Amino acid sequence: LAHNLAEAAPTARVGDPEFLDSLRSISTCSDLMQNIVSDMLDFERIDSGRLVLVRAPFQVTQLLEAARAAFGGLAKSKGVHLSLESAPEQLQNVLHVGDARRLQQCVNNGVSNAIKFTES
């Protein structure tokens, strides 16, 4: 993503949708990397029985958008079309309660594996 952004920088405008999408993707990937480091530390907590699940409201659409942003570049570089269908309008803003970070780990793992094992 950063490479694509650097190549587009001379002609791109900061307000261009593609430019903004790339910036959001870089931000999402940065958050993902921070979570990966934290996840590695969680293995020690799991082994010692000290892992605490955080129950908080979240939107499923945000989890799916974050996965699309994080893995969209990888899918594109592999020639795999990664798409996300919109939820019905009445479900788009529904809040669920649970550990969104743990669920994001599962979604990311599934998307990553789908890209990895899909032939282009």
Image (cartoon, rainbow, N blue to C red):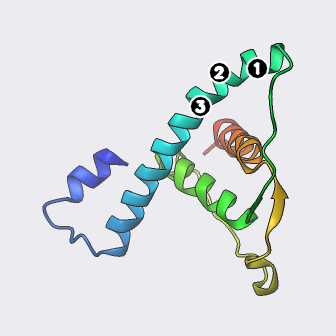
Q: Are marks 1 and 2 in contact (CB under 8 Å)?
A: yes
Residue 114 versus residue 46: which sits nearer the camera? 46
Residue sitting at 28 percent across and 54 percent down? 5
Secondary structure at badge 3 equals helix
Badge 1 local density, few (<14 within 10 Å), some, or many (20+)?
Answer: few
**Which residue is rendered at x = 36% and y = 67% of the image?**
20
The amino acid sitting under disc 3 is Ile
- What is the x, y in percent for residue 88? 79, 82
Q: Residue at x 64, y 22 (%)?
A: 40
3D distance between C-alphas at marks 1 and 3:
14 Å
Foreground residue, 47 or 88? 47
Q: Residue at x 66, y 28 (%)?
A: 39
Three-letter amino acid code at disc 1? Arg
- Disc 2 is placed on an element classified as helix
The one of 14 and 12 positioned closer to us in this rendering? 14
In this rendering, position of residue 9 left or right of residue 119: left
Is 19 on the left or on the right of 37, as rendered?
left
Q: Nearer the viewer, mark 3 or mark 2?
A: 2
Quickly name the residue at label 1: 45
Between marks 1 and 3 in the image, the one whose residue lies nearer the viewer: 1
* Residue that numbered label 3 is attached to: 36
Residue bearing mark 2 = 41
Where residue 45 appears, as percent x and y from the top left, is: 76, 20
Which numbered disc, 3 or 2, marks the residue that appears first in the sequence? 3
Quadrant of the image occupied by residue 95? bottom right
| Contact? badges 1 and 3 (CB < 8 Å) | no
As shown in the figure, which amino acid type bears the numbered disc 2? Answer: Leu
**Mark 3 burial class by Cα count in 10 Å: few <14, some 14-19, many 20+:** few
Secondary structure type for disc 1: helix
